[in-house]
Amino acid sequence: GAGVSQSPSNKVTEKGKDVELRCDPISGHTALYWYRQSLGQGLEFLIYFQGNSAPDKSGLPSDRFSAERTGGSVSTLTIQRTQQEDSAVYLCASSLGTGGAYGYTFGSGTRLTVV
Amino acid sequence: AQSVSQHNHHVILSEAASLELGCNYSYGGTVNLFWYVQYPGQHLQLLLKYFSGDPLVKGIKGFEAEFIKSKFSFNLRKPSVQWSDTAEYFCAVNPSGNTGKLIFGQGTTLQVKP
């Protein structure tokens, strides 16, 4: 597609439920990144994919968070047993390759609210 | 710890005022530097970036930023702001040789009064 597409755009879930957030990157972009933007804070790196593998998962806040990417394209971020502190905007970005030189295109994000 | 600091969290200016938003980082090696903007209700967009060469980089919409290596700074400037510049601004650093992930500052909310 023309841009990075994320779905759903908004998600309200009950504490303890599992959620899946989807990211569809720009076609041909091999690198994919997930970030989290919490109220009053900057963007926090979560995980990076190169193709289908995730060389850097250092930002995942707990083992309740996991992500996968299939076919070198769509990625899914899963949060199990959601907690209120998981409420945030989850952003996905894709890039032609790694390294800042390629630039990043961000999606519009998924706003997750845990009640 | 490696980090990116934006000194101003909330800036209020009148139209035609000059703007300077501070950004400092704590990485010792080579870095790529970025400023992103997020207009209300929109996704993050790239304003400008620095990789190498002339430390004064020009971006879209009249914005510019200067990389001062000795000060570990990459401040964003605009000579005359407009109401449409109201947005949140993020400084980001990509340490060279890493996976390409960006380390973001906390952001600065700019409010321009007409």
Image: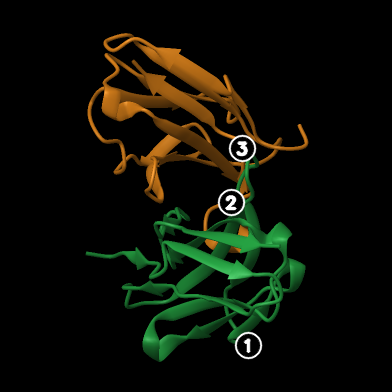
- Expressed as whole percent of the image width and height from the top left, the position of residue A110 reads 52, 28
Q: Taking B30 as reference, is B69 above or below it?
A: below
What amino acid is found at the position of numbered circle 1 in the picture?
Asp
Q: Which chain is orange?
A: A
Q: Measured from the top left, where is residue A11 in percent x and y?
A: 49, 17
Identify the residue at image location x=64%, y=70%. Answer: B14
Is residue B45 visible in the rendered structure shown here? yes
How far apart are the two marked residues, 3 and 2, measured between alpha carbons? 17 Å
Q: Amino acid at mark 3?
A: Gly
Q: Quick one: which chain is green?
A: B
Q: Residues within 10 Å of mark 1 (few under 14, many from 20)?
A: few
| Foreground: disc 2 or disc 1 | 1
Q: Residue furthest bottom?
A: B70
Decide which of tag 3 and tag 2 comes sooner along the chain.
Answer: 2
Which numbered marker is on residue B54?
Answer: 1
The chain under label 3 reads A
The numbered disc on residue A105 is none
The answer to whether dots 2 and 1 both sit on one chain is no
Residue A55 higher or lower than A68, as above or below: below
- Which disc number belongs to residue A107? 3
In percent of the image, x 34 and y 25: which residue is there? A66
Horizontal and vertical percent position of residue B75: 51, 78
- For label 3, the SS is loop
Q: Secondary structure at mark 2?
A: loop
Q: Which residue is mark 2?
A: A97
The amino acid marked with disc number 2 is Gly
Measure the C-alpha gap from mark 3 to mark 1: 30 Å
Horizontal arrangement in the rendering, residue A2 relative to residue A89 (left or right): right
Q: Is mark 2 in CB contact (under 8 Å) with mark 1?
A: no
